[in-house]
Image: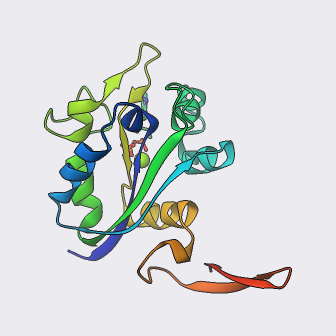
Amino acid sequence: MNEEATLIIIKPDGLKKSLTGNILTRLSEAKLKIIGAKVIMVGEKLANTHYRHLKDQSFFPELIKYIQGGLHGENRVMALVYWGRGAIGKVRRIAGATNPEEADPISIRGAYGRILTTGLYENVIHASSDPSEAEREIKLWFSPDEIVRKLYPVKEESVSGTTRRVWQ
Ligand code: DAT
Ligand code: MG
């Protein structure tokens, strides 16, 4: 198993239902390292970019509303980067299947997810599904200095006299 990083998002329903502690406890079973964590509000641009592979799906507008908190009156999400051997697969297993009704009942999505009457899967967390998706998503959600490990190449960028580190 390769050492790798994966992105996890605790979605607005997870925060609204006060599930953060339960979810982090479940994820700790994987014996991975947290190398980045923050609570943020998701803007439209971030939401659209994150879910760009689904833009032609009928549920896309509802999905964008969901991740931005529009279905829960709760505009926060918690974003985390976990790192370790086989991290992507281990986290996906603990998360469970995309459809919460098909997910193992002891997985996070099986235990806490539901299907809305609109058909949208309200499934509590996001987890990267493969290494290239993980890299794209981590670079989208985190800047290099928000992660306590050198994951991907970085460059310096100068903006009006101040330099900052950005992904190459
Ligand atoms: P995953 O989140 O398991 O990687 P995905 O990337 O295919 O799944 O989809 C992103 C989210 O979109 C998913 O967590 C819930 C929602 N979704 C996916 N497929 C759906 C469907 N057929 N009906 C309703 N919601 C769906
Ligand atoms: Mg996915």
State the image coordinates of residue 61 (x, y, percent, origin top left): 60, 29
State the image coordinates of residue 129 (x, y, percent, origin top left): 36, 55
Q: Is residue 163 above or below residue 64?
A: below
State the image coordinates of residue 31 (x, y, percent, origin top left): 17, 66
Closer to us: 72 or 120: 72
> Position of 157 compared to 111: left or right?
right
> Position of 58 compared to 97: left or right?
right
Q: Quadrant of the C terminus?
A: bottom right
> Position of 155 compared to 86: left or right?
right
Q: Quadrant of ligand 1?
A: top left
State the image coordinates of residue 53 (x, y, percent, origin top left): 54, 46
Q: Quadrant of the N terminus?
A: bottom left
Location of residue 62 (image quadrant): top right
* Image color mode: rainbow
Location of residue 47 (image quadrant): top right
Q: Is residue 18 above or below residue 26?
A: above
Q: Name the residue: 77% across, 83% down.
A: 162
Furthest residue to the top? Answer: 117
Q: Name the residue: 48% across, 45% down.
A: 77
Location of residue 158 (image quadrant): bottom right
Closer to us: 68 or 21: 21
Q: Name the residue: 68% across, 81% down.
A: 164
Count of labels in the image: 0
